Image: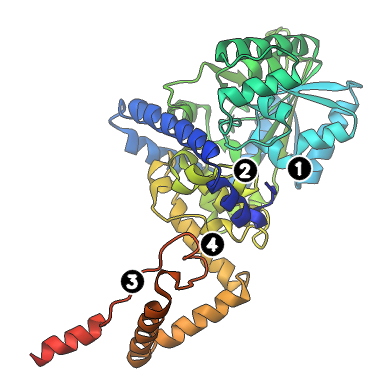
Amino acid sequence: MNLSPSEFKSNARRAVHDQHLREKIKKATGTSLVKRAEVVGEIPEWEELRQEGHDRRKEVIDNLDRYIRTFTGTARDRGMIVHYAGTHDDATKIIYDIIRRTSVDTVVKSKSMITEELHLNAMLETNGIRVIETDLGEYIIQLAGETPSHITAPALHKSKEDIARLFQEKLNIPYTDDPVKLTAVARERLRKEFLNARVGISGVNFACADTGTLTIIENEANARLCTVLPDLHIAVMSIDKIIPSIDDLPLFLKLLPRSASGQRMTSYVSMINGPRSHHNPDGPRQVHVVMLNGGRLQLAKHPAWKESLYCIRCGACMNVCPVYQSVGGHAYGAVYPGPIGAVVTPTLFDMKEARELPFASSLCGACTDICPVKIDLHHHLLLERREIVDRGYKPFTEKIAMSVWRWFMLSPARFELAGRIGWVLQKILGKKLPLPGWTPQRQAPAIAAKSFRSLMKGDSKK
């Protein structure tokens, strides 16, 4: 697939015809939805928690400048070195300069969507630094030379047989599709990397403004090993990861795991409060926090689209989306797939290149209903569709077609004429009536010999 959002239509067309891929995605997303329903059903006040989460995220995004200053100050008071990166290039340069000063040629890294957004691995490897992904899903797709297809389950598109063949080829082991054995192989290979690593890179799930605490949640302990064993820890986060207070953590630790993986709580919750000290002799000697703006401050000022920054990256909207279930994450050609990706990719990156993504939705509203912080996703998609049309990013042929449609619709007589023309063409061409974008995959809708209007006129005469 061409990993560009401008190629969504051709990517989606290929994915839809890949029955094996669709079965894997359906199975994985279906399992996630069942598990989520079970643990959410245990909380009678779930809707109240969603609203509270929405309100806390709104508070931060409405006052983002102030919260950035507060978090930066408290994190520095804790002994962390905080860097502010205005652009993606600024962020990668900062990270590379930190690593270069240590004279290491290998870093271990835990799962992080913001580093995917930065294309950090490619940049570091181009500059001679070997990057080891330590999350099992990320490790799998790194071996495969692919990108994540889901926010929380990077290798969701792969079956155990796919992974078995990959490990056999890349790790030179006998073929086995036993998940326990495959995991043991990965664990053995990665343990050596952890023990030798001097630099660890992680993402951040939540950054508490009042205390400067960085919170990372996971299930494999790889993030904890990345942040504790090396002498240098680089935490990479976007500025919208800030939450007002450490007192807000319990709320988000209820919302995120249940929505992301169907768990009451993840296996590991790491709360990082700075480098080692005489009071706390464990952990890294230095903690660097790289905060990426990347257009988010500007987006936070938009009255409608700022709500997309409330996202806590759970991936639930992908699991429930009929489009994502049919084509998978790679078809979107963007870092963030699914409904949230269709919202943020045009507004945060390039609307012209990503102009097809907001139309990759049935507008069923399931994404809005499942979002743990109540982002009105399907209405945002509608707003972006309008913006794309207003900017003239739709094909010229579509403009002509809509102009012709408008001309017929503005006159009852012309509308009735269009119906008669369609009926005649249908009689001649039958099911082969060509409707671009519709009939290649579907049967043309039947046109009645008499319109509803003419039938009503006949009844009125009676």
Question: In the depicted view, which residue is nearer to us: 123 or 12?
Answer: 12
The amino acid pointed to by label 3 is Ala
Give the label, 4 or 1, closer to the camera: 4
Closer to the eye: label 3 or 2 = 3
SS category of the residue bearing label 4: helix
In front of the other: 415 or 373: 415
The image shows residue 288 at horizontal and vertical percentages of 76, 27
Q: Up-down: is 347 above or below 57?
A: below
The disc placed on residue 340 is none
Front-lying residue, 129 or 72: 129
Amino acid tagged 2: His
How far is mark 1 from mark 3, CA to CA?
A: 57 Å
Instruction: Give coordinates of residue 399: x percent, y percent.
Output: 56, 78
Q: Amino acid at mark 4?
A: Glu
Residue hosting label 4: 384
Residue 110, x across and y down, in percent: 68, 24
Pointers 2 and 4 in contact (CB under 8 A)?
Answer: no
Q: Nearer the viewer, mark 1 or mark 2?
A: 2
What kind of element bears circle 1? strand
